[in-house]
Amino acid sequence: MKLGTALIFPLLAAGILVGCGNSDAPKQATKEATPAPAKEAAPSAGYLDKIKARDKLVVGVFSDKPPFGFVDEQGNYVGFDTDIAKRFAKDLLGDEKKVEFVVVEPASRIPFLQSDKVDLILANMTVTPERAEAVDFTNPNLRVAVQAIVPEGSPVQKLDDLADKTIIVTAGTTADLWLTQNRPNWKLVKFEKNSESLQALANGRGDAYAQDNLVLFSWAKQNPGYRVLADKLGNEAPIAPAVKRGNIELRDWVNTELAKLGEEQFLLKLYDQYVRKELADGTDPKSVIVEGGKWEG
């Protein structure tokens, strides 16, 4: 990923809430195992009418992964992904408040779609062939690479130096999947939440933490004494919203919406609001966002 110098985002430990973008009563999302590929397709016809009849768009989001999805000090859902969901609700239902946020963890994103707990996932999910067997991705809105972070004084200089070390991962993330498939003999310590993984790193419970590089650069800036290894775990990849497999109507609506928002540079506005101030000077926004759903690999 061509980000130049380090990208940085603040870490915010957040409560778990479900609501319409404000301080509604909290609700803990159920933990579920990583799913098998979907066996049944969602009905593609009439799904938008179903949402309109309900008068509410139900979206799975993160609560502890700024700047994408987090809860602010007033208990409001905010962030890059969260604000996209609000705009979707406004354009589909006429009011950005007609969205219900359901907090998900990385491993529960696909099960929540498959079990109809949410209409849509906007929780920073990287597109992979395995996930594409279980859900339908829309066109992308972000790009990312996976790297690892270590304490500044660590002797580790490259990825393979971690072969005899303990690596922290968040369960269900691309880093977890990649290491499990490509480095099956390496020792992994898994946590459910990104905030738990970062706390474990700070407490010395592992030698490194592997995660999306945007999160790692954030941690390095907010917590001096850490550095991100240059090696990448796999290639740069797109991040995209996801719907239940077979829900072609909602998928196509989101793609049309992303194209329309691209004409007004909506993601760039969110980038300016949530991201730009945290990045290194001179960082090209196109190295982070995918405006209009137009992926250029």
Image (cartoon, rainbow, N blue to C red):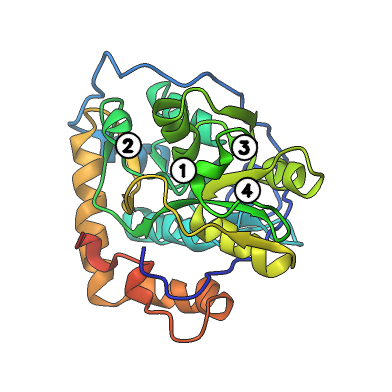
Separation of marks 3 and 4 at Cα, in angstroms: 23 Å
Among numbered discs 2 and 3, the one appearing first in the sequence: 3
Q: Nearer the viewer, residue 153 or 90?
A: 153
Which of the two marks, 1 or 3, is nearer to us in this view?
3
Which of the two marks, 3 or 4, is nearer to us in this view?
3
Q: Which residue is mark 1?
A: 59
Q: Which residue is mark 3?
A: 167
Q: Which residue is mark 4?
A: 63
Q: Nearer the viewer, residue 257 or 1?
A: 1
Among numbered discs 4 and 2, the one appearing first in the sequence: 4
Neighbour tally class for label 4: few under 14, some 14-19, many 20 plus, Cα within 10 Å: many
The picture quadrant where one finds residue 186 is: top right
Separation of marks 1 and 4 at Cα, in angstroms: 12 Å
Question: Of the residues shown, which amino acid type is indicated by label 2?
Answer: Val
x%, y% of residue 193? 65, 38
Q: Answer above or below: position of 221 versus 84.
A: below
Residue positioned 26% across, 24% down in the render: 42
Residue positioned 52% across, 69% down in the render: 7
